[in-house]
Image (cartoon, rainbow, N blue to C red):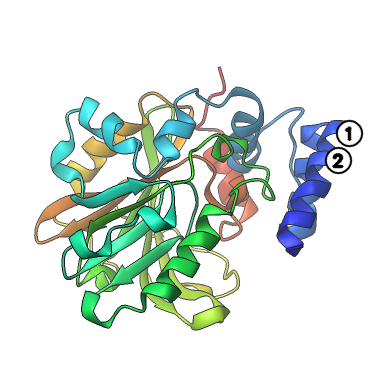
Amino acid sequence: MNIKVIYGKMLVTMSHVFGVDFAKKFDTRLRFHRTLNLKNPTSLADKVTYVELHKQSSLASMCTDKYAVRDYIREKGLEDILIPVVGGPWENVEDVDFDSLPDSFALKATHGCKMNYLVADKKQLDREKCKAEMSRWLATTYGAYSMEPHYLTIPHRIYAEEYLADAAQLTDYKFHCANGEPLFVLTVYNRKTDGDNGMSLNFDMFDMNWKQIKGMIPHKKELPGDGTTPKPETFDRMVEIARILSKDFDFVRVDLYERNGKVLFGELTFSPDCCVFPNFPQSFLDEMGKRMSLT
């Protein structure tokens, strides 16, 4: 049995015996070497965790679903920021009709994180390898081993999006929003996949005036940049979109891209880094916690 599955089952048992707060604090201490205060939440990590465990919006699961969230985006009048879908959704790997898909496409799972398969040229695609990867996705219940319960009710499906040839070169602008207001922006760039060794990347942090927030902490292969990420031309539009999409939630991260002068939607994330934010110093989390209300 997979070690993550075993660990997830242990956390579930721990939650039943000692309560979800105890299990989450245990997990956070073991994996991230951080301490949470869930009796009197004060830091951003405390409050986001408290929301995830005790007062998460009923919309969170639907808006985390990579396919279903598209309806939410449309309801907010923002259909123009969606990357077009070219196939699916499919519940079974055998239902994926490769022949009907365009020459290039991006396969994605609806229910988890880092479940993407980019196909630049369908003629070169190893279909059996691709099917094996998708089967692994469908068999994975994301969130079970990370104390992120809003993932547990998302249907396991696969769909295909339009392929963006320059996707690896795009900067990811992650607006962390509390009570409908963006607090700060995390920019992610220089993403590189190293086979089974995971992904490396660089990141910078900026306040809403595009002033660099210093003191960020390296975590695994995630390394702070030098703060030279240029302010996107569409920044004001991004802020407007972040406000619209975060209005219904205590906390959500709104991920956006800028491509050819146009804003594109990435995803909505309700528990970034398992709500722990390992790249952020405690002093910064304490400061941001003061700006998030739980009432």
Classify 250 as above or below 10: above
Classify 281 as above or below 10: below
Residue 126 versus residue 185: which sits nearer the camera?
126
Q: CA distance from mark 2 to mark 1?
A: 6 Å
Q: What residue is pinned by disc 1?
A: 18
Give the residue at x 20% y 69%.
Answer: 104
Give the residue at x 37% y 28%.
Answer: 180
Residue 130 versus residue 273: which sits nearer the camera?
130
Query: Which residue is the extreme one toward the left?
Result: 261
* Residue type (three-letter) at the residue carrying disc 1: Phe
Give the residue at x 16% y 64%.
Answer: 102
Q: Percent from the top left, x then y, of residue 124?
A: 27, 82
Mark 2 touches mark 1? (CB < 8 Å): yes
Q: What residue is pinned by disc 2?
A: 14
Which picture quadrant has residue 172?
Answer: bottom left
Residue 261 visible in the current orientation: yes
